[in-house]
Image (cartoon, rainbow, N blue to C red):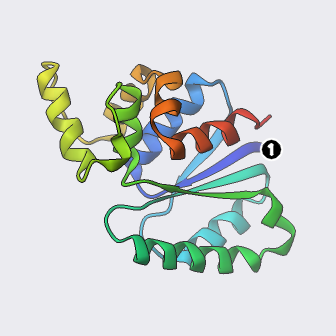
């Protein structure tokens, strides 16, 4: 049985979340949603079935109203899976997962940064490191993130970590 199922937007998010789960020693299956189709979330949840809890991560980016509408559609799709509703948690990631990485690298107010991906690229260059947006790089960054500082600097990351830590 997969203890925790985590649905993310794309492959780099998948790499980062897998790295965080490994760091916390929490077994999970991370599944990319690929596309903003709420029915995909329902299909993923229905096909996996064997999980203690599911966490759905949805980036806010810039279109708050659009994201809110999408989250509401996802919740409507989840209601179609009556027996699974209580196991499912939806978290809106303020801006993007790069905000969480920045929080863990001790950047203040990462959820207020307009373009966290660009900010992360600049930070990596300042550190003398080449930045490539890839699942492998994001998984490595997850290992470098200071979790305690990150949860203090990002409310959405704190919510995610609290849910993940309570998983078996």
Of residues 148 and 142, the one drawn nearer to the viewer in this rendering: 148
Of residues 164 and 139, the one drawn nearer to the viewer in this rendering: 164
The local crowd at label 1, few if under 14, some if 14 to 19, many if 20 or more residues have their Cα within 10 Å, is: few
Q: Which residue is drawn at 69% across and 64% down?
A: 45
Q: Which residue is drawn at 36% across and 40% down?
A: 135
Which residue extends farthest right? 83
Q: In which quarter of the image is residue 82?
A: bottom right
Residue 111 visible from this viewpoint: yes
Q: Quadrant of the N terminus?
A: top right
Is residue 93 shown above or below 2?
below
Q: Which residue is drawn at 67% across and 50% down?
A: 5
Q: Which residue is drawn at 17% across and 19% down?
A: 127
Name the spot of residue 155 as percent of width and height, x first.
Answer: 52, 43
- Secondary element at image label 1: loop
Name the spot of residue 15 as percent of width and height, x first.
Answer: 43, 39
Could you tell whether 150 is left or right of 163 in the image? left
Of residues 120 and 139, the one drawn nearer to the viewer in this rendering: 120
Name the spot of residue 54 as percent of width and height, x first.
Answer: 70, 53
Is residue 63 shown above or below 57?
below
Residue 132 visible from this viewpoint: no
Of residues 84 and 135, the one drawn nearer to the viewer in this rendering: 84
Q: Quadrant of the C terminus?
A: top right
Q: Mark 1 points at which residue?
A: 1
């Amino acid at each position: 049985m997969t203890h925790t199922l985590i649905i993310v937007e794309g492959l780099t998010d998948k790499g980062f979340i897998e790295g965080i789960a490994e760091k916390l020693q929490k077994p999970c299956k991370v599944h990319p949603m690929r596309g903003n189709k709420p029915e995909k979330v329902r299909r993923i949840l229905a096909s996996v079935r064997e999980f203690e809890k599911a966490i759905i991560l949805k980036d806010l980016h810039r279109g708050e109203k659009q994201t809110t509408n999408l989250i509401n559609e996802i919740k409507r799709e989840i209601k179609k899976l009556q027996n699974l509703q209580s196991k499912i948690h939806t978290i809106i990631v303020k801006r993007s997962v790069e905000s969480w990485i920045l929080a863990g690298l001790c950047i203040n107010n990462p959820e207020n940064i307009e373009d966290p991906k660009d900010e992360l690229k600049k930070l990596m260059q300042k550190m003398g490191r080449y930045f490539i947006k890839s699942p492998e790089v994001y998984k490595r960054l997850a290992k470098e993130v200071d979790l305690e500082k990150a949860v203090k600097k990002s409310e959405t990351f704190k919510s995610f970590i609290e849910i993940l830590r309570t998983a078996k």
